[in-house]
Amino acid sequence: MHFENRFYGHRLILALYAGLTKLDAPILGFLQHGWDAHSQFRGGDPTWPGSRLLVWNSRDLATAKESGATRVVAIGSPFLYLLKTLESEAQGSTVTAAQIHVSFPGHARTHLIAAKAHERYAQHLLSSRSSREIVVCLFWKDFEDAAVRGAYESRGLSTTTIGHRDDPMVLFRQYLLLQRAASATSNVISTALLNAGALGLPVSVSGPPFDMDSPRDAQIRREDEAARWPELYRPSPTTLTQPLAEGELGREFLLPPGELAAVLGWTRWSQRAWARASAPGLGAIVSAAHKRRGRQASGKARHG
């Protein structure tokens, strides 16, 4: 199995949804692990030539086919399957009251760029903050960098992280964080922001973009994305973005449990259609996600 199929707990999420008895069953193919403005499947997967591609949305499906890929299937994003699974398990449960505004800043590639870029973005958050507490959810490597955390904490903002992409509980923690949120923003379109939008949260992209390569390149990318997805580039969050988020995450391609198991090569491990009797209870998994999130972020969101 391709090593990237383990990222962000995608395999675990899909296995729980499909009702597998073997939660670490190998996925037959290369599963898209994140959203990108420009298709990452142009010409197929360069790290695994000739592999079967499992993409999220119609845009990536079309690009892969146009590039000559013949073994490509759109199945939707794992986060949407997580939502469907949790919805079926949470009948009658109490919904957490929205308490915070969460921000998912992009991450720069070097320490020097990261610290200065995050300082500028922190200033933007302060200038546009609402009456709600702002929690800045950082990329795990940025969270470990005291200078990056300090860019926010020194200005009175809270910081947290959902963990490393190799941790299978990452998206469970992101879900828990978003359950506390009333709105979400970022300075770049990202998977996390689209996940928030798919949950129905008001979202937007604003603030200075990070100079990943050069200021000019960053501005060109910003102008390109703003032209393609104007719904997201607004000064304040809006719920008008939910249909866009669901489309980019591939809601139209979501499969029933049995069909998903067949597509992923899991037929021999699947239970009867919807059964999850021998899989770990999702309540226990969400509880574990909450506890591990606490340890990851030193027990609570950090403050300066």
Image (cartoon, grey):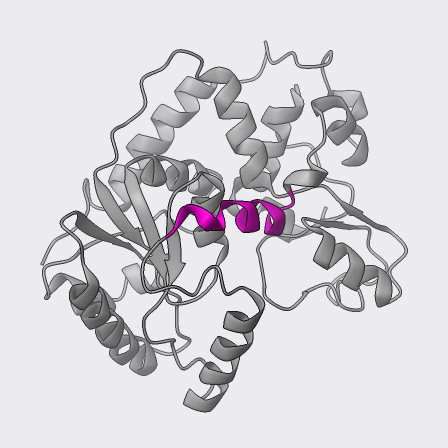
Report whether 269 appears left or right of 176: right
Q: Is residue 245 magenta?
A: yes
Please tell me which residue lies in front, 165 or 118. 118
In percent of width and height, residue 95 lies at: 32, 23
The residue drawn where x is 82% and y is 63% is 49
Span colored in magenta = 238-250
Instruction: Classify residue 292 by image quadrant.
Output: top left
Instruction: Classify residue 175 by image quadrant.
Output: top left
The residue drawn where x is 13% and y is 49% is 131
> Is residue 289 positioned above or below 52 on the image?
above
Please tell me which residue lies in front, 65 or 303. 65
Report whether 38 appears left or right of 182: right
The residue drawn where x is 51% and y is 31% is 83
Magenta span: predominant SS is helix
> Is residue 11 positioned above or below 108 on the image?
above
In percent of width and height, residue 30 lies at: 73, 51
Please tell me which residue lies in front, 202 or 58. 202
Q: Is residue 248 magenta?
A: yes
Quadrant for the C terminus in the image: bottom left
Report whether residue 273 is seen. yes
How many circles with numbers are drawn on the protein? 0
In percent of width and height, residue 137 lies at: 31, 54
Instruction: Classify residue 254 by image quadrant.
Output: top right
In percent of width and height, residue 234 lies at: 38, 64
Report whether residue 165 is seen. no
